[in-house]
Image: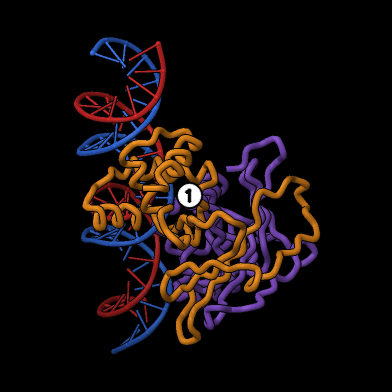
Chain colours: A purple, B orange, C blue, D red
Amino acid sequence: MLKNSEFVSKLRNSGLRPTKQRLKICEVLFNRDKTFHFTINDLAKNISENFNEKISLATIYNTVHAFKDKGYLKEITISSDKSYFDTNITKHHHFYDEDTNLLIDCNDNEIGKVNIKNNITGKKISSVEVLVRVASDTQNQD
Amino acid sequence: MLKNSEFVSKLRNSGLRPTKQRLKICEVLFNRDKTFHFTINDLAKNISENFNEKISLATIYNTVHAFKDKGYLKEITISSDKSYFDTNITKHHHFYDEDTNLLIDCNDNEIGKVNIKNNITGKKISSVEVLVRVASDTQNQD
DNA sequence: TATTACTTTATAATAGTTCTAAACTAAATG
DNA sequence: CATTTAGTTTAGAACTATTATAAAGTAATA
């Protein structure tokens, strides 16, 4: 596995030792062509189903949060009961499809730069996130 | 109380009977000069402390959600563990101060119109929300 | 008033997340 | 390479936020 050393440094940079469980999590998250969105639940299920290996939820939370804190994952919160992680850590925005509960990455071709005319807080901007909720015409959007 | 009939119709429009408890909630939420942000917890505390009257949490959730569904309140989710309601139901965006956990309304003078060049979903847009996180330079933003 | 339908409430249930401490494992040391 | 140390995994407990329940109460209606 070529990527192994990359996973090890991601873990070390996040202050974590490279263990069997954490490397498995890395493989699931980062050994892909395309970035993707997931919930903690998705991830746990994915590992237990596709790898026939059960990693304790505590370890999954712990590792995902360390990656998030270090910036290897982004968190996107849709509502109080729906939180996704994104392996795409570049600056980008999202469409959220309320019919299917799917999150879709946008790039600059979809959503233009947000113009902050007046930073009334005087503080440093740490992020700018746009969430565009969409639904089919016939559906109720709540 | 002049506003009482306004509260009664807000409740009726939301499919709720005007009861003593619900009218108290309306008073706390809508009998103000300025709109504001609150959590369910804030609201419960506010009522029990300032009005010396305890309304069951179930009733508070129930009423707040009915108002939200009807559009008399907006929900703003900051992260999986922080969800605010906003009595300002006009279209607007927010600054979120990570140092103080305060949410600040923006108007068009602060954040320009978001330019959606390409709605790749083909579906109807139900909302566009911008959240600008800010923090002081010296602080860690997580 | 009497009846009906809706509401409030305390409490139980649930879901998602964090905590704990014992058994285990990686890294550092001699 | 054996030993020690510090960090890790795990199941399950604890905790928090929210929703469900069902008995007692209240608003609306006849």
Where is residue B118 shown, x and y percent of the image? 80, 57
Q: Is residue D17 left or right of residue B86?
A: left
Residue at image point 28% right, 45% down: B55
Q: Where, quadrant-wise, is the N terminus of chain A in this rendering?
A: bottom right
Q: Is residue A73 visible?
A: no
Where is residue A38 shown, x and y percent of the image? 57, 54
- Comparing A87 with A114, the one in front is A114
The quarter holding residue A33 reads: bottom right
Whether residue A24 is situated above or below residue B70 in the rendered picture: below
Q: Is residue A117 visible?
A: yes
Where is residue A72 shown, x and y percent of the image? 57, 70
Q: What's the chain of the residue with tag 1?
A: A
Q: Is residue C14 left or right of residue B52?
A: right
Where is residue A14 shown, x and y percent of the image? 49, 74
Residue under numbered circle 1 = A81
Q: Is residue A8 left or right of residue D10?
A: right
- Comparing D9 with A71, the one in front is A71
Q: Amino acid at mark 1?
A: Asp
Within 10 angstroms of label 1, few (less than 14), some, or many (20 or more) residues? few
Q: Where, quadrant-wise, is the C terminus of chain A in this rendering?
A: top right
Residue at image point 48% right, 73% down: B97
- Comparing B62 with A65, the one in front is B62
- Comparing D14 with C9, the one in front is C9
SS for callout 1:
loop
Q: Is residue A108 left or right of residue B85?
A: right
